Amino acid sequence: MIHWGRGSVAHLEPELARLKADSVALVTTRSLLTAVEALPIKAMATVVIAQHAPMSQIDAGVEECAGARGIVSYGGGSAIDAAKIISVRLAGGGSPPPHVAIPTTLSVAELAAGAGYTNEAGDKAGMRDPRLMVESVIYDADLTLATPMQLWLSTGVRALDHAVEGFLAPGEHPFNDVMALEAIRRLFDSLPRAKAAPNDADVRTENQLAAWFSFTLPSASAGGLSHTMGKQIGARHGIPHGVTSCLLLPHVMRYLTKKLPDRMGVLSQAMGGSPADLVQDLIASLSLPQHLGAFAVREPELRRAAAECSGKHSVEDLTHIYISAL
């Protein structure tokens, strides 16, 4: 179930009652600890998760949440993914306690039946399990106003990445195509307006709806080339998920123009120009990072990352994409 709109956090208590979650654990981030009082719940435990969801913190969270009959996540993708894993770990082989997600970014982790985390080696890993799906999502833009603008906008580009990669996914998916194109249109329209009016919750609601529309083909979107390449460098070099999309998506799109000319042609017609150039221009207009070199990532590390995610695409091609992003 999805609730959206300003003030929709009022649905949290009725949702928890509907789900018979009378003892709730909260999973959030350190930056939101002072804001949890805005949530109409009293949590039996509060788990704090850092960027990229370190497994050590998830392990500790499982112990802290023992006995919880419901999980509420409040934050971005790292908090939401950690809460998913904690809920499944609490279940053992059975049904997990219901999870209600209250996102404060546009990464739409709350819509995926997968979860990412960082392992002990510092590499990004993930798990897939239908039980990871959350029971309810609450998109309340009023609760996002404290999200730093760069984080908000960069995760908006992450949503754009979902829409583009879902549209370019193999196979026939007419429903997703319509939703993806609408998501692209809405993101191009509303993200610049969010930058211009940081405290306008109505615009942020528009951003949230566009992000929701971007993820109707979740497996394909999350497994696209830009996402895959971003995961190889994100946790390892401390680059947030949304920023990896800012750095890589235009270059991946240029590469895919040669591989998927028909699909890219449709995208070009819908967007009114070169899709890769338009995406790059949008990222620049939002004052978001555009160069991997700014994160002290060097060619040898990029060649290693290319080798690790090669297979369908050659190491040479992937290395070229990474180097183009420097």
Image (cartoon, rainbow, N blue to C red):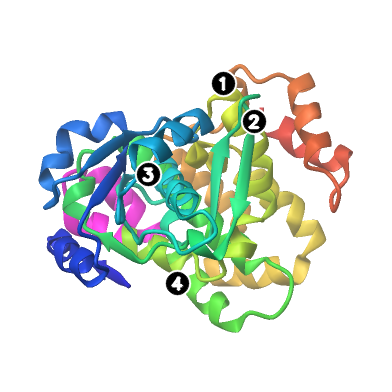
Q: Which comes sooner in the sequence, label 4 or label 1?
A: 4
Mark whose residue sits in front, 4 or 1: 1
Q: Amino acid at mark 1?
A: Phe
Q: Residue at x 60, y 71 (%)?
A: 269
Quarter containing the N terminus? bottom left
Q: Position of residue 228 (x, y in %)?
A: 67, 46
Q: Residue at x 53, y 66 (%)?
A: 271
Q: Which comes sooner in the sequence, label 4 or label 3?
A: 3
Q: Position of residue 28 (x, y in %)?
A: 31, 39
Neighbour tally class for label 4: few under 14, some 14-19, many 20 plus, Cα within 10 Å = some
Q: Which residue is mark 1?
A: 295
Neighbour tally class for label 1: few under 14, some 14-19, many 20 plus, Cα within 10 Å = few
**Residue 223 appears anywhere in the view:** yes
- Numbered label attached to residue 76: 3
Q: CA distance from mark 4 to mark 2?
A: 34 Å
**In the structure shown, which secondary structural element does the residue marked by tag 3 occupy?**
loop
Q: Which residue is mark 2?
A: 123
The magenta stretch is: 187-207
Mark whose residue sits in front, 4 or 2: 2
